Amino acid sequence: MTSRSLRNARTPAAVRAGGGLVLTGFEPFFRWSVNSSWVAVTGYAARSMERPEAVCLPVEHRLAAERVQALVRQQRPAALLLVGLADRPVPTLECWARPGVLAPHAGGVRIARWGMGAALAAAQRAGLPLRLSVDAGRYVCETTFWLALGLPVPRVAFLHVPPLRRAWPPARLSRLVAAVLAGAKPR
């Protein structure tokens, strides 16, 4: 996917018809003065023709959970793509979430509602590495993902992106978000 095609990126029609797309990233935390998740989300949103809702979440369990609940209540999205930073060389699309600190006794896992195969194929076509993961990290990422999977949103996924580096500049992160959104289409 070229930068020109990213400028012309369209949110999947099924998402547009059903209430729109919400993207979330996170504010800076710990040693990360710039959170690559927010860079990826805002980069995609700025270039997308549909201008999806982009929201920066706080890196605090309860506040982030409250923000996600409010977003879903207000926006009623057809798709919610949460994006977080993980210090890994390859981005990962999370397959499920475990209960976090806000629901420690809930047990079990909640499964992502996303076309994982379509997202992986789109990333491959764009020349971008992407792997599936079964460990969303047991931090605010997993808390928000677990919560979102319990809300009435047809499509929910969590994407972990690497930190900003030479291999992962802002434009490449935005292209990755665009590719992963191929999974928002109904199966």
Image (cartoon, helix red, strand yellow):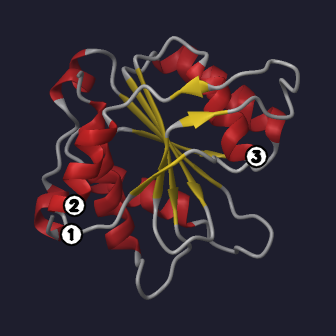
Q: Which residue is mark 2?
A: 124
In the rendering, at what x and y percent does residue 173 appear? 38, 66
Residue 33 lies in quadrant: bottom right
Q: Is residue 2 left or right of residue 90?
A: left
Say if residue 151 shows up in the picture: yes
Of mark 3 and mark 1, the one earlier in the sequence is 1
Residue 47 lies in quadrant: bottom left
Q: Is residue 178 left or right of residue 147?
A: left
- Mark 3 to mark 2 CA distance (whole Å): 28 Å
Q: Secondary structure at mark 1?
A: loop
Of mark 3 and mark 2, the one earlier in the sequence is 2
Q: Which residue is mark 3?
A: 138
Q: Residues within 10 Å of mark 3 (few under 14, many from 20)?
A: few
Q: Secondary structure at mark 2?
A: helix
Marks 1 and 2 in Cβ contact (< 8 Å) = yes
Vertical placement of 26 versus 22: above or below?
below
Amino acid type at circle 3 is Arg
Vertical placement of 1 versus 74: above or below?
below
Vertical placement of 115 versus 155: above or below?
below
Q: Which mark is residue 72?
A: none
In the rendering, at what x and y percent does residue 38 appear? 53, 58
Q: Which residue is mark 1?
A: 127
